[in-house]
Amino acid sequence: MKQFLMLGNETSQVILSLSLMLFAGFLVTRVTKRLKLPNVTGYIFAGILLGPYLLDAVPVEVASGMGFVTDIALAYIAFGVGRYFKIATLKKSGGGTLIITVLEALLAMAAITLPMIFLFHLPVPFSLLLGAIGCATAPASTIMTIRQYHAKGPFVNLILQVVALDDAVALVAFSVCTAVTQALEGGGKVNAMDVAAPVLWNLGAVVLGIGLGWVLHRLISERRSSDHRLVIANGVILGMTGLCTLLNISPLLSCMALGASYINLSGNKHLFKEINRFTPPVLLLFFVLSGMRLNIPALATEGVIGVAYFFLRIAGKYAGAFAGCALCRMPGRIRNWLGLALIPQAGVSIGLAALGERMLPPETGALLSAIILSSAVLYETVGPACAKASLFLSHTLEQEDKPGGAGPKPRDEAQGQPEEGKPVVRGHGRIRKLALRMLQAVHH
């Protein structure tokens, strides 16, 4: 296939490679869907299949020239995350959700970074970036599981709030660790200004994102057609991303601020739905490219380090969620099982790995990417099962899904409280009504 692509000119090579990547991503998901795996896993497998270590189907020059896809995909992901930051919703949840999120994210980071430095004796920049990336949680798998079982209640509400805030904490942690990494890789000592300067640049980008959110709100009105709304929104998002790339700043925080600003000013989620219908091919290309960049020989080097990362992150997430819930005096059924719902990792983490790989030397950069990509496949495989287990163990759901039935019921529906003075009758239909009348007659 590669030889066929090389026959054409540069333009034809790029276009045919894009077509091949899209079809490969789609076809592999036909297999992963039967295995009950998320689409993200299929896209990554498609990239590995097309990559230089297996079929070598896409020219290296074409793949290396698509680095901009990473920045654009991350911009769309971050913009979508911004919709969850409605001020009214955050006020309702209070500070408890923020405390839990910060603790579960930062304890996961510490659980990864410290052993990598002191146990495995890996470079500090590598360990910091790996720990910062470990903060992130992929909400898609958990949210899909919640929707599948129609779960509702305080436990579900807390999960949705935590996974929405989690990526924001990860982005801030990654920005700070990036500043430290750049100083260390530059050979200089880390001082306050080395850390403060990139953080200030990112804060400036956040302010710009908020301002562009206001501009987007003013430009988009009900009078405009959906086509023009989509054109304007993409123009603003790409413009924000281009400015950040020009200034060597990650577009994540600024685009998240752009989405948050727009949703709070307009209160309209329709634009996010239109963007979501536009972005699937872009995200598919992003994940396929990530799979193509996976350095398979580095997996042998990864070895114990990759396995340790996999389990250390789970332990850190669980311990942080437990500690946060205990500090906020959450009920035991929430405190004990929230950590299980925070295991999936993909999307933002894969994008951060691509950014981190650029900052590190080639060998450690390849190791970082290999660890994140291989563990993301495992996390996305076990994550939905763990999320389902957390819903049942927390008694949010009380019974397994039955063929032809309505599925598991929330606990409040499955175990309704009887009215005072009335006996409890388990049954259905006419038998239940008849038994209830007879028992009420005896009671009176």
Image (cartoon, helix red, strand yellow):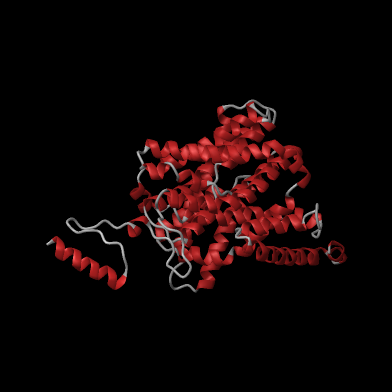
The percent position of residue 291, horizontal first and vertical second, equals 71, 53
- Residue 361 located left or right of residue 99: right
What is the residue that sits farthest to the left in this orientation? 444
Instruction: Tell me the quarter of the picture where residue 328 sits.
Output: top left
Q: Quadrant of the N terminus?
A: bottom right
Q: Which sits in the foreground, 21 or 329?
A: 329
Q: Residue at x 54, y 43 (%)?
A: 170
Q: Residue at x 32, y 56 (%)?
A: 415
Asked if 376 appears above or below 230 in the picture, the reply is above
The percent position of residue 332, horizontal first and vertical second, equals 38, 41
The percent position of residue 444, horizontal first and vertical second, equals 11, 62
Q: Which sits in the foreground, 358 or 419?
A: 419
Report whether residue 79 is seen.
no
Q: Residue at x 57, y 62 (%)?
A: 235
Q: Which sits in the foreground, 199 or 123?
A: 123
- Residue 429 located left or right of residue 256: left
Q: How many marks?
A: 0
Report whether residue 4 is seen.
yes
Asked if 233 appears above or below 305 in the picture, the reply is below
Q: Which sits in the foreground, 435 or 20?
A: 435
The percent position of residue 187, horizontal first and vertical second, equals 70, 28
Asked if 4 appears above or below 351 in the picture, the reply is below
- Residue 88 located left or right of residue 48: left
